[in-house]
Image: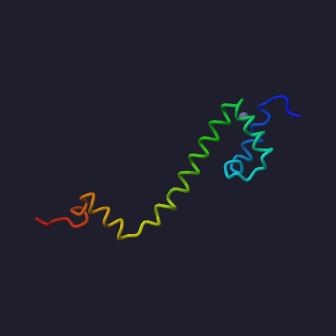
């Protein structure tokens, strides 16, 4: 039994990625949310971890952009001159 709320921090941070993935049971989620409500430190860690996961997952979507689409995008942005510099 944990009377001291901060005894839960190590436990919570250990299962944080599973909590974010939604891999924990509803009972455990409730326990974690109860702890988060009273522990700002763990809330900050949770937010930071979530943002880091978003950043890691984002480039996977970016890599699906085909080369010709990128080329058109460059041209639309008037970067054509940079791709084909005029010689003077
Ligand atoms: Zn905590």
Left or right, 60 with respect to 42, comes to left
Where residue 61 sits: x, y (%)? 50, 61
Q: Residue drawn 22% across and 67% down?
A: 84
| Residue depicted at x 27% and y 60% | 76
Where's ligand 1: which quadrant? Answer: top right
Q: Which one is in front, 85 or 32?
A: 32
* Image location of residue 74, percent across then percent down: 30, 62
Which residue is at a point 62% across and 36% down the rendered structure image? 44
Numbered label tally: 0
Q: Which colour scheme is used?
A: rainbow
Q: Looking at the picture, tell me which residue is in the foreground, 83 or 77.
A: 77
Q: Is 36 situated above or below 81?
A: above
Screen quadrant of the N terminus: top right
- Residue at the left extreme? 88
At 59% from the left and 51% from the top, the residue drawn is 53
Image coordinates of residue 35 in percent, x first then y, are: 74, 34
């Amino acid at each position: 039994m944990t009377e001291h709320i901060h005894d839960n921090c190590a436990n919570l941070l250990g299962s944080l990625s599973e909590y974010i993935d939604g891999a924990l049971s509803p009972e455990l989620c409730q326990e974690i949310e109860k702890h988060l409500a009273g522990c700002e430190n763990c809330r900050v860690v949770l937010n930071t971890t979530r943002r880091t996961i978003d950043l890691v997952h984002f480039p996977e979507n970016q890599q699906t952009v085909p080369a010709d689409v990128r080329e058109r995008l460059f041209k639309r942005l008037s970067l054509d001159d940079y791709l084909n510099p005029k010689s003077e």
